[in-house]
Amino acid sequence: MPDFLSDIPNNALFFGAAFLISLVAFVFLIFIPALKSFGRWPEKMAAGFLSLFIFGALVTVGVVGGMAYVFFSSDVSGILPWATG
């Protein structure tokens, strides 16, 4: 592993890789097909804006869910009824 990567924690590298893979999947599976579906530029702009809006909403839900998990992770029996704590 290169020297500049040895100072970065492994979980930061994993999160960065997951972010990059998710971004590439979003662009190729959602954003580009949404732009190609319409012919006129106002329709393309609207489709692009709505795609980015949905992406932002999904990222927000993921961040809030992750923060909730971290906040409640010391005792998950309160948020997971099937967990025995």
Image (tube, rainbow, N blue to C red):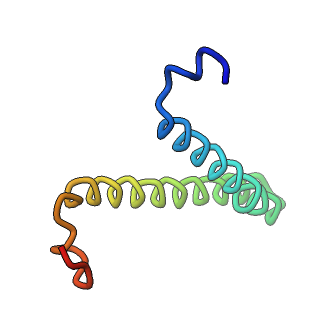
Residue 43 point in image, percent of width and height: 71, 60
Q: Is residue 24 toward the left or the right of residue 52 in the image?
A: right
Residue 36 point in image, percent of width and height: 82, 60
Could you say which is closer to the camera, residue 61 or residue 46? 61
Could you say which is closer to the camera, residue 75 or residue 20? 75
Quadrant of the rendered image containing residue 74 = bottom left
What number of labels is visible? Answer: 0
Residue 44 point in image, percent of width and height: 73, 56
Which residue is located at x 39 percent, y 61 percent? Answer: 61
Could you say which is closer to the camera, residue 85 or residue 14? 85
Quadrant of the rendered image containing residue 40 = bottom right
Q: Residue furthest top?
A: 3
Q: Is residue 71 toward the left or the right of residue 18 in the image?
A: left
Q: Is residue 26 toward the left or the right of residue 35 in the image?
A: left
Image: 10 above or below 81: above
Quadrant of the rendered image containing residue 75 = bottom left
Which residue is located at x 61 percent, y 42 percent? Answer: 17
Q: Which residue lies furthest to the bottom in this view?
A: 82
Residue 26 point in image, percent of width and height: 67, 56
Which residue is located at x 68 percent, y 52 percent? Answer: 45
Which quarter of the rendering shows the C terminus?
A: bottom left
Which residue is located at x 70 percent, y 61 percent? Answer: 30
Which quarter of the rendering shows the N terminus?
A: top right
